[in-house]
Amino acid sequence: MLVWVNGAFGSGKTTLVDELRPRWPEALVYDPEMVGYVLREIVEVPTGDFQDLRLWRREVASLAVGLVEEYHRPVLVPMTLVDRGYAGEIFSALTGRGIDVHHFFLKVPRETLEKRIDGRRLTPDIPEQDERVRRWCKDRIEQCMAAADILPSDTVFLDGELTPQELADQVLARVRAGGPSGA
């Protein structure tokens, strides 16, 4: 089983997965951004977004399948994925291998996203880089918010302004109830 936690930058994906982790200790955490960082070291990313690389999408799905098949453990994936075609490509590859995919999307108002993004410090020693990352995230808020209307019909939308504990309760209840929620 794979649980994909989706939403805009600053919506609380990683925070939610961090809350789920101790409650679901057998689950593995897989961050597809790492695949993007590796690819960025090897090839040029013309658009600046490694999700636009077909190889990224293929490898994200392949590694997720490998984790489930090799370790027989649930996999938690905190990753913004708002292009309908890209989501379809990845989720189809997973479900095509028999993996149950639970897809959750954290809905958060723009003002809250901006506040959370402004509060981030990823590279405190390099303030210019921090500002570039914050600007990049903010520039994608509209696209991320609009994705709610185009994601797979069985995506489970969650109120991203709830506490991480409340969100984790909802995710675990839905997952334990059975049946995939996004494919």
Image: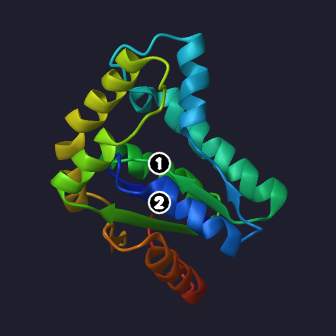
Residue 55 at what x, y percent from top left? 53, 28
Identify the residue position indicated by label 2 in the image.
5
The C terminus - image quarter: bottom left
Q: For residue 37, which quarter of the picture?
A: top right
Front residue of this view, candidates 164 and 172: 164
Residue at (61, 59) in percent of width and height: 76
Asked whether the residues under the numbered discs 2 and 1 touch, taking CB atoms below 8 Å apart as contact, a structural biologist would say: yes
Which residue is denoted by mark 1 in the rendering?
Answer: 79
Q: Position of residue 178 (x, y in %)?
A: 57, 85
The location of residue 80, given as percent across then percent down, is 40, 47
Residue drawn at point x = 19 percent, y = 59 percent: 109
Say which quadrant the N terminus sits in.
bottom right
Pick whichever, 108 or 58, lies toward us.
108
- Which residue is situated farthest in the bottom direction here? 177
Q: CA distance from mark 2 to mark 1?
A: 6 Å
Q: State which tag comes first along the sequence, 2 or 1.
A: 2
Name above or below for residue 81 compared with residue 50.
below
The kind of residue on which mark 2 rests is Val
Dot 1 amino acid type: Met
Tag 2: Cα neighbours inside 10 Å, few (<14), some, or many (≥20)? Answer: many
Q: How many marks?
A: 2
Name the residue located 77 percent from the left edge and 68 percent from the top edge. Answer: 26
Q: Position of residue 140 (x, y in %)?
A: 24, 38
Say whether residue 168 is left or right of residue 23. Answer: left
Identified at 47% across, 60% down, the residue is 5
